[in-house]
Image (tube, rainbow, N blue to C red):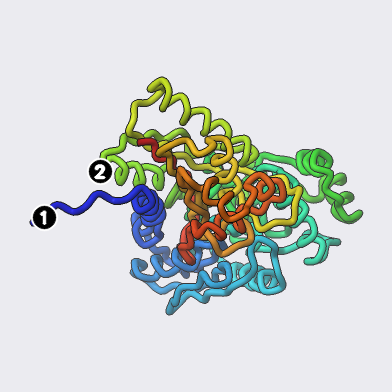
């Protein structure tokens, strides 16, 4: 049997991304985390980009009756027989998400200690599971969410604000399930895998406070409606704290994490003859600044063989941020990649891929892009100024013009950002 040809750098990078996404598929990861069926009813609730795929995996492996409702992003639905799938907007909530959330809250009313609630929670749930606190409207929540997305706040800071202005997040949905047993099955899309930050923690306790949320609003100059400011200042928006009796029968099981995805990608790199190095699964910071750090490491590897020998692949995950200053078509992964290209300045032989494992980078149905050693050269040849694209946060337009966008379609999972830099 003839030897198969070596994959091209582009193909190898895509194989690593595909392996990362495959490792986080609910059908693979969820069954081993399921509890035993209860004496009473099993109610399924959930929200997130992976929630429908999680519901399908649950249905396929649950040996007893069940019923329920989960809400996912438009286009991320998966056909189920016993669990209803609702669809709503992400990253800015809409009326469909509000209606689905109200129905989910209703579905856990009147449960007994013999019943079991399975909560299927994944990234994206913060906007999909929406119930404004007293005095706020959906429009208020939309405006606050858009301001947070543009502010440069970290995901932990954004979710702290969301928890304290919600009637469902910060453990409130979990409290509504009492006295039933509650098992939360999580697919993590946040640095550090903190349960309170995944979909803003609707079923888990939260140690942050209303004062923390107010400080974040002030730090990023978020213009809060008067009702929201009063809600936080009075302490009325306080979330459920650890040891709250209403969560006494609640437990959390981690189904998939960014580290699992990076390890799967590392195996692909190793098989292709590149030594993989995982720099971290929870890197944060401004996308363009994180890119400069990565570029400095690449130069050190090529010039001095430190801290790694070539050929190698640098892998990382986490969630960078973008402080919007322009009106371009951007996303944190393509912003990272364009900034990386500028920092490397066409360094020979280096390829890179950056993408969101859910298939959506920013507001676009584009997962990310590929950077090649001649990306900047090809751009200039087309009359494109790479720096101007970065300045106006327009990296999707840049990479689309080069034909280097990465489009996966709905991946039905979400374990945060994926970055791979191939150094020959």
Q: On the picture, is 100 further left or further right than 81?
A: right
Q: Which mark is residue 271?
A: 2
Q: Residues within 10 Å of mark 1 (few under 14, many from 20)?
A: few
Q: Nearer the viewer, mark 2 or mark 1?
A: 1
Residue 58 in percent (x, y) is at 40, 66
Instruction: Give 291 or 212, whichever is nearer the viewer.
Output: 291
Camera-side residue: 414 or 8? 8
Report the side of 255 relative to 245 (left or right).
left
Which residue corresponds to mark 1?
A: 2
**Is residue 181 at least partly visible in the picture?**
no
| Residue 206 drawn at (x, y percent) | 65, 44
Circle 2 packing at 10 Å, graded few (<14), some (14-19), many (20+), is few
Q: CA distance from mark 2 to mark 1?
A: 18 Å
Percent of width and height locating residue 323: 72, 45
Quadrant in which the N terminus is drawn:
bottom left
Q: Is residue 253 above or below residue 297?
A: below
Q: Quadrant of residue 172?
A: bottom right
Q: Position of residue 386 (x, y in %)?
A: 62, 47
Q: Which disc number belongs to residue 331? A: none
Residue 97 found in image quarter: bottom right
Residue 263 seen in the current view: yes
Quick check: 390 above or below 347? below
| Mark 2, secondary structure of its residue | helix
Chain-order first, disc 2 or disc 1: 1
Q: Residue at x 47, y 70 (%)?
A: 41
The residue at 64%/57% (across/down) is 126
Vertical side of 323 occupied by 133: above or below: below
Q: Residue at 70% across / 69% down in the picture?
A: 94
Q: Nearer the viewer, residue 17 or 135?
A: 17
Q: Is residue 140 above or below residue 300?
A: below
């Amino acid at each position: 049997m003839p030897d198969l040809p070596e994959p091209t750098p582009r193909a190898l990078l895509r194989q690593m991304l595909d392996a990362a996404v495959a490792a986080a598929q609910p059908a693979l990861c969820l069954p081993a985390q399921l509890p035993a069926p209860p004496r009473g009813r099993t109610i399924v609730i959930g929200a997130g980009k992976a929630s429908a795929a999680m519901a399908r995996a649950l249905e396929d492996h649950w040996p007893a009756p069940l019923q329920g409702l989960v809400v996912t992003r438009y286009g991320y639905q998966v056909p189920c027989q016993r669990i209803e799938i609702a669809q709503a907007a992400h990253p800015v909530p809409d009326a469909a998400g509000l209606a689905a959330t109200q129905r989910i809250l209703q579905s856990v009313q009147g449960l007994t200690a013999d019943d079991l609630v399975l909560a299927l929670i994944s990234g994206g749930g913060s906007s999909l599971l929406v119930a404004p606190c007293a005095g706020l409207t959906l429009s208020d929540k939309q405006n606050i969410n858009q301001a947070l997305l543009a502010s440069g706040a970290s995901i932990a800071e954004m979710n702290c604000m969301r928890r304290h202005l919600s009637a469902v997040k910060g453990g409130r949905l979990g409290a509504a399930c009492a006295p039933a047993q509650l098992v939360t099955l999580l697919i993590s899309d946040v640095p550090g895998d903190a349960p309170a930050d995944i979909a803003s923690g609707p079923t888990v306790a939260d140690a942050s406070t209303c004062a923390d949320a107010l400080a974040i609003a002030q730090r990023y100059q978020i213009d809060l409606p008067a009702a929201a400011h009063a809600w936080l200042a009075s302490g009325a928006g306080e979330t459920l704290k650890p040891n709250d009796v209403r969560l006494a029968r609640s437990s959390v099981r981690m189904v998939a994490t960014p580290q699992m995805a990076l390890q799967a990608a590392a195996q692909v790199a190793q098989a292709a003859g590149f030594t993989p190095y995982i720099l971290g699964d929870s890197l944060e910071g401004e996308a363009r600044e994180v890119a400069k750090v990565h570029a400095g490491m690449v130069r050190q590897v090529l010039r001095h063989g430190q801290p790694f020998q070539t050929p190698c692949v640098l892998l990382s995950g986490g969630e960078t941020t973008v402080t919007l200053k322009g009106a371009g078509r951007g996303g944190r992964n393509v912003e990272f990649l364009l900034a990386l290209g500028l920092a490397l300045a066409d360094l020979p032989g280096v390829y890179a891929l950056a993408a969101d494992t859910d298939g959506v980078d920013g507001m676009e149905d584009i997962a990310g892009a590929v950077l090649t050693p001649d990306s900047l050269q090809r751009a200039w040849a087309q009359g494109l100024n790479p720096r101007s694209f970065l300045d106006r946060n327009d990296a999707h337009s840049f990479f689309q013009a080069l034909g280097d966008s990465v489009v996966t379609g709905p991946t039905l999972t979400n374990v945060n950002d994926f970055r791979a830099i191939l150094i020959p």
